[in-house]
Image (tube, coloured by chain):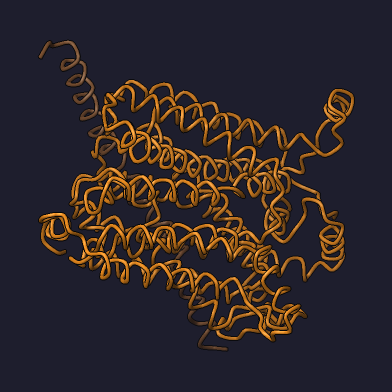
Amino acid sequence: MQLFDTNFTSLDWGIVVAYLVISIFVGIWANRYVGNIAGYLVAGRTLRIRLALATMTGTEIGLVTVMYSAELGFTQQYASLYLALYELVILLFIGLTGVVVYKLRQSEVLTIPEFYEKRYSRGVRILGGVMMVLSGVLNMGLFLKAGALFLVSVTGFTEPDWLQQFMVNSFDYHEPVGLKLIMTGLLLLVLFYTVLGGMISVVITDLIQFVILGTGMVIVTLFVVNEVGIDGFTEVVTVQNGYFDPTNIDNPSTEKLNDGIGPITLTAQFVVLVVALMLWPTGVSRSLAVKTPEIARQLYLCSTIPFLARRSLPVLWGIGAFAFFHSHPTLNAQFQSAMAAGGDVNTQAAMPLFLAKIIPSGLLGLVTAGMVAAFMSTHDSYLLCWSGVITQDVVAPLMKNELTNKQRILVTRVAIVATGIMLLIWGLWYEVSSNLWQYMAVTGTVYLAGVFPVVVCGLYWSRSSPVGAYVALLGGLTGILALDPCIDFLNSGFTELGINLTVRSEHVMLSSFAFSLLGFVAGSLLFPDTRPNNSQAATAEGANP
Amino acid sequence: MTGWMTLWTIVLLGGGLGMIGLLLLVTVGAVRELKETLAELSADVAETNDSQTTPS
């Protein structure tokens, strides 16, 4: 058996293509239900609990989620399940108490920046919208790359010779290009039906995608358990030095020191997940799309299950890949040398390479269609979310809200295409060298550090002021310093200055949250909101849950 | 080790069984909910078209 051997055949390609064709028709069909901007952005706030749950699951189980979770399972084995545990506990808390989400839905806003204007000022709304889009688009930067890597690994795809020749002869381009073109095509497909149908086409396709993806996840899990066996999963810890204690900073499955999780990472990830689960815009847009504040609360409570599944099942596949490669020394040697050679193969590829060998043809096509569904359902919702923010929170306020419904839908559609093009340039053609989950947590911090005090204090603290909001939102920009190149730069600077100090990304992330929160409190106390009756308005909006 | 592995086993079982349960729950009632949602949106579209054609 060779590293790139796969069970993926023409039958599997047929299944994937059939799925994509159905998605196009759904987008065209759904266009008839778009009447106004609320219909386009939040499906007219008509979603019931099951539909909202399906679409939220479809959005939040992205291919990128599957890839980074499986990568963590492969590199950190059982210990990486602490993230699943965190999400379970945090969502249970939000779902049982309704904290933040209930009042946000009650405020009748379409987006979080709209809340900023209602609570603070139009300027805060525009700045908040810009920060949200900046962070969100950066956060999506690696989605296409991860999707590409999955497809290459699971299908064993290699570009045809004629295409390679064409690129060399026409553009003097010598890098592999076939997969980049496939991913571009997928993105164009998502753009097509998102631009056409808005939230309602996203909801319908998310429902189909949820069924395909959920079934695919169950099938994969059964095959992984069958292949590795209960004894194999036990041997990961007892024989193969697998990592199971996340409080230990040393990962026993690697030779590097301090290469594990440890208390600082545990703390930083907890803070990031609390704020992300409460206020990540795509999740919030679902809770704003439901019929009532009570359904918004229920949605979070019911989301504990899919969120637990999205974090735990791919980790199991990653652990399965770890066990599989360790029990096949020849394959493991090929995998290690492919990673050492650079190029596209890295630890993210372990899971799809493993699945390509254990799942039979036909089912592999269904699973791949499920993963393509995961890729698309995340992209469509994210594109709609960011472009909705651009329209409602940046362009419309700048135009003094004089846009008609039709103009708003047009601006949103243009923003979807523009965002898609930016993603294509950033994520597909631009090389990002950072670790996948770390990159996402860091880029998320740019938005999350600012939004936490601005929304939570805005809802529950009557002395919150616009100046505090500006300071907190801009403070989130310090999160960029947690990116790997900045951390390397900081540490080399300390070394040159003779300072014995090593900074980690987690230190900077936690500092960003602290800086924004303290900045918000200081700004609000030093520069109180002087507008008459305004500061009490949003906090008094309905009863506490 | 036993404590940690027991915890992770519960998490993994919860994720797997939960996903199966969720699939059953959603697929049973989601189509009916989708029909209701589409009916309401159709009414909204009709209303929007009426308001655009009727002079104020």
The answer to whether residue A543 is left or right of residue A255 is: left
Residue A120, compared with residue A70, is above or below; it is: above
The answer to whether residue A32 is left or right of residue A162 is: left
Residue A205, compared with residue A211, is above or below; it is: above
Residue A175, compared with residue B10, is above or below; it is: above
Residue A67 in the image: x percent, y percent?
A: 61, 56
Q: How many marks?
A: 0
Residue A371 in the image: x percent, y percent?
A: 57, 45
Q: Quadrant of the C terminus of chain A?
A: bottom left
- Asked if residue A316 shows in the view, the reply is no
Please tell me which residue is depicted at 68% across the width and 43% down the height of the picture.
A361
- Asked if residue A401 shows in the view, the reply is yes
Residue A96 vs residue A209, the one in the foreground: A96
The answer to whether residue A99 is left or right of residue A446 is: left
Residue A358 in the image: x percent, y percent?
A: 70, 55
Residue B51 in the image: x percent, y percent?
A: 16, 17
Please tell me which residue is depicted at 48% across the width and 62% down the height of the picture.
A445
Residue A408 vs residue A472, the one in the foreground: A472
Residue A112 vs residue A250, the one in the foreground: A112
Please tell me which residue is depicted at 39% across the width and 64% down the height of the picture.
A275
Please tell me which residue is depicted at 16% across the width and 60% down the height of the picture.
A539
The answer to whether residue A374 is left or right of residue A293 is: right
Which chain is brown in the rendering?
B
Residue A274, compared with residue A379, is above or below; it is: below
Q: Quadrant of the N terminus of chain A?
A: bottom right
Which chain is orange in the rendering?
A
